[in-house]
Every structure is written in structure tokens, then in C-alpha cells.
Amino acid sequence: MPTAPTPLRTARRQWLEQGQVENGLIPETLRASWARCRAFGLEPLGRPQGAPHASAAQLARALEHRHSLVAHAKPVMAFLNEQVQGSDSLVLLADAHGLLLHAAGDAPFADRAARVALRPGALWSEQWRGTNAIGTALAEGSPVVVHGGEHYLDRNGFLTCAAAPIADPAGQLLGVLDISGDRRGYHRHTLGLARSGARMIEHQLFEARHGAGLRLRLHAQREGLDSVTEGLLALGEDGWVIGANTAALELLGLTRRDIGATTVERLFGLDLPALMAGGSAPRPLRRDGGAPPLWLRLEPGRTLRHARPAADTAWRPVDALAALDTGDAALRATLDRARRVLDKPAIPLLLTGETGTGKDVLARALHASSARRSEPFVAVNCAALPEALIEAELFGYRPGAYTGASRHGAPGRIREAHGGTLFLDEIGDMPLAMQARLLRVLEERSVTPLGGGAAVAVDIRLICASHRQLKDEVAAGRFREDLYYRLNGLTLPLPPLRERTDLAALAARLLKAEAPERALRVDEEVMAAFSRYRWPGNVRQLANVVRTGVALLDPGECVITLALLPDELQTDPDVTPPAPAASTEPAGNLRQLADARVRETLAAVDGNRSEAARRLGVSRSTLYRWLGA
């Protein structure tokens, strides 16, 4: 007697034959994932499309970019692998785009998994691999199990997978920890292992980022404090919650968007001085509504350990550089390097990065954090000054030096910066003749005004910035090589917004700055749109979007919704297209796909071939040969 079909088999048959599934057969999350896969154009039984796969160079760059995540995940993955060893399974780490970064597990199963590209370098987002634990956990933002026939693509049906998202302390989704194996070895405890592993990684990331700062440890039981199951909150010196792990969010009934948007006073009814007055001994905290008490312990950290809390004291960041740190590892590395030469004016600084990444903001923070903070900060945009006026603007002029000159003369911007900081923005646009004069000023530490006269000694800290690759400008003959090496004492790169991991915290900070008197936040759909968008205008564009969203809020509203965003964020997420596959199309199609990818990349970097080559993972000579083919 034939056995009755399972609900899942019935659901797949209905989906294949009718394009829909009756209610109750499968979970709603699975139905929603299948619907997304159909929208992506995937065919459950069809020939698999050419999904992207990172080259060795691209994978190496991804590992470098996610160094902190990978470094903290590897020991946890090794521990999990010991628990599941011999069960035909793999422990996998993916980034926030679904790119597999690292794997550990049984070699025989790894060989089987490699046949469906379940290996480092492959992209396992739903868009390319259909419903799967990694891609669906990223799409849902929560732990999931995808077992056997629940996978959208029939070729992946031999797998059983459990995955849990990993978030950084600022609430930004960093990636996913996954345990995948043969579906015949499914065990319902696997998801628990994946979730525990993800929390262990989050715990380590939190300690690495906030271990020296003000922290609250939370647990429902006193004995749970200092364990990997405890909740962790990082507090700013003004009492705002600037970091949290998933355990803390669950204990307090918060979401990731609350990070950077709430204070300890709102959470516990105690302001920061009152909390600090209680010392660092564990103590129970009664909660409203009959909820069981929480045990908490305050750890002041190195920066506040000897501070005396006062009710009327407004806590402030240590300095302007610290205020720029919202959690991104690449930006923090840049800030740390800058701090080491902060008061060494003999070392000029060169700020690099795309337009809108905040080079001018960093320059002002460097000045405000230095010993020269009380002296002038003089900014000059070399791209905004007409070539005929830039010499007089920079070096000054004597009375009557040229037609139209003031009869009183002018000292020039360099002399105005004496004792302080001179910031030359877009230095790559300075005319060659002016470059020679600037080099002489830097070498002689004196400036001679236009029209003659005695040289005037100047003491300046020089900071320059450019969105151009100055090495390429030197090679093209548009920038003096000797000036380049004179300016490039220390290069400080600023990452583009699309590569930063602190988007949620940054958006919350901009929102607070725009409306400090209101408790505003952004909707989850908005954060999802923010995460998908490529941000060609970088932080400047994000600030404009936040400012516009606040302006469009009705009185009494406190949530920025998708409807308040510009059209391009609502309808065109402008996601950077992934590289095409290398083995699934005929040679003619490959050439067309590669040509299109090269053109898109060149357009995205305004024709900068060096940057395009870096993003494509090839050498400049290879790119030149390709363009000339």
C-alpha cells in the first residue's frame, strides 16, 4: 500500500504545478523564501544558472576586509566541528552578502558539497542559490533550518542546513554561521549548536570592541554573569547604548535598531551617574509588569574607572576622533593610525577615499583632537578655486599685485593657518604651477606673497585629501612626483559606505544629530534598503537621506519609513552586480558578460582604471590588455 505524500512533497508539487501552496502545508517563512526565489527568476528543476564565484584574489580581499569576524569565528568553528565530527557535515562562515569565507569539517562530505559549490568563494544568497539556510537566514535576519526538499533548487535537496546570523555590537549584520550536512543525518539540535556558536562569536566581537569601555553585564541568574550566555551592553559616556549582543537584546525585549537610539535611563529607570554610584558589585534589578528581576554588573572600563559621576555632568567622548568611531573596523584602524601621529606636525597626512566618505570631517576631527585645537583650521578646496585665483588665495599678495587686487593686500590662506592646520581638499586638482610653489613652501617653511616682498615663516600642520589616486596622476604627468612624496607622510584611507559595517550605528547617530530632542528611529525595511543600496554618495548621501526623512515626518511621528526615502532607495536598490560565473556560459557570452562587468566597474569609479582593476581582482596590465582587445 503506497504511503501518503508528506506535506512538503504536496507543497512542492503544488508549487511546481500551480505556482502556489495552500495554507498550513509549510511554514510562512519557507513560503516567503520560495516566492523571493521565483522573483529572482530561479527554476527549481531547471539547469542551474551561472552563480558568481570569487576568484582567489577576491576571496583574499574579502577575508582581509572581514579579518575580525573570521579571526573570532575560527576557534568557535573548530569547537563546533569537534561536536559534529564524523557526521558528514561542514561548519561554514559566510559574510553579509552570503559569500562563503571559511569552512571546517569532514573531508568526504566536503567533496560532495563542493559539487554544488558549497565551499569558500561561492555566493550563497537566495538570489543565486535559492532557499538555503545561509541565504534565508540573511534574508530573514533570524536563525533557520532548511532541510532536504525545503531547498528551492532540487539539486540542493540532499542537504540539511542550520544557520544563525552574526551581528556586530552596533547591530550591523556581519554574516552567518552555518552547519550543513547530509539530510539523512538531520538532528534537531543542530540549530541550537549554530545559534550557540553565533552567540559565542558575538560575545568575542563585543569584548574586542568594547572591552576597555563602560559595560553592563546582564543575566536572569547571578551565576550566569561572565558566562557566554550573558547579555552585554556597551554604554557611551553620555549614557546612550552604543553596543549590545543578541542575548542582551532578547533579555530586554529590544531590537538591533534600538542600539544607538536608547539610553540606560529609559531601560532601567536609572541614569548613568546613579548606575555608577552603585559600584561594580552584582545586583538585582526589579522590573515593571511582574517580569523576573535581572542581575547586572557595571564595569566602568579604563576610560571611566577613576571618574566621579555627577548628576549635572554631561559625559562627552574623549575627543573628536573618538566621536567618529561608530564600530567599523577599517575606519577604526584609520583613526588609530592617525592618533599615533596626531601631534607630529612634521608628518603630513594624506586622506584618501571616494567623494562623500568624510575626508573633510576627518580633517577637522584631527585638528580638534590635536594640541593645535585652539589655533586656526583653514580649509581650501583646490577644485573649487579658479586657476587664476588659486595662487593669490593660497600664498597671498601685496597691494596692487594684480588687476582687481585689494589695495590692502591679503596674507593668503597658508599664512592664516600659521600655528594651526592647513587642509588642502582635492589636492589632485591643483594646477602644476601651483604645485611647484607649494612644494617650495613646504621645504622652506616660509611663503612669499604674490607681487614680491620678504618671505614670511609659517608653522602649519598640513593635511591633504583627494578622491583621485595620486600615484596615477603622477604617472599621467598631472601631479608632481616630488610633491606627492612630500605630502604622503602617512596615508589615511576612508572606506566607502557600502563597505562599512557600522551602517545602523551611523544612521542612528545622524538621526540623533538631526533631531536631538526627539526619540527617532528608522524602520526595519529602511535598514534593509540601506544595506542593499550601493551609496554612490557615501556618508554625505546618507546624511541627506536622513535629513530629508526627518523633515518629511508628520508631527508626532517617530519612525522613518520606506515611504519617506528617495525614489532610488525605494525602487532601485542599486546593488553592485556580482562578477559573472567563469564556467557556465559559452565563450561568446562570457566575453559579453565580462565586457559589461568591466564597463560597469569603470563607470562606478569614474574611469579610474587602478581602482577598477582592484575591484575586479586583476592587475592593471590585465585590465589594459582587456580594454585594448
Image: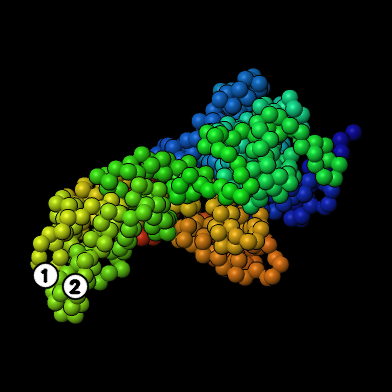
Amino acid type, label 1: Gly
Contact check, label 1 and label 2, Cβ < 8 Å: yes
Residue at 80% x, 39% y is 286
Image location of residue 151, percent across then percent down = 68, 42
Apparent side of residue 176 relative to residue 438 in the rendered image (left or right): right
Amino acid type, label 2: Gly
Disc sitting over residue 409 in the figure: 2
Mark 2 packing: few (<14 Cα in 10 Å), some, or many (20+)? Answer: some
Q: Which residue is mark 1?
A: 451
Of 471 and 593, nearer the camera is 471
In the figure, 48 relative to 111: above or below?
Answer: below
In the figure, 303 relative to 488: above or below?
Answer: above
Apparent side of residue 422 relative to residue 316 in the rendered image (left or right): left
Residue 94 visible in the picture: no
Which comes before the other along the chain, label 1 or label 2? 2
Apparent side of residue 424 relative to residue 337 in the rendered image (left or right): left
In the figure, 2 relative to 236: above or below?
Answer: above
What quarter of the picture does the C terminus occupy?
bottom left
> Which type of secondary structure does the marked residue at label 2 adopt?
loop
Mark 1 packing: few (<14 Cα in 10 Å), some, or many (20+)? Answer: some
Residue 553 visible in the picture: yes
Of 466 and 617, nearer the camera is 466
Image location of residue 561, percent across then percent down = 66, 63
Image location of residue 428, percent across then percent down = 27, 58
Of 195 and 376, nearer the camera is 376
Q: Quadrant of residue 145?
A: top right
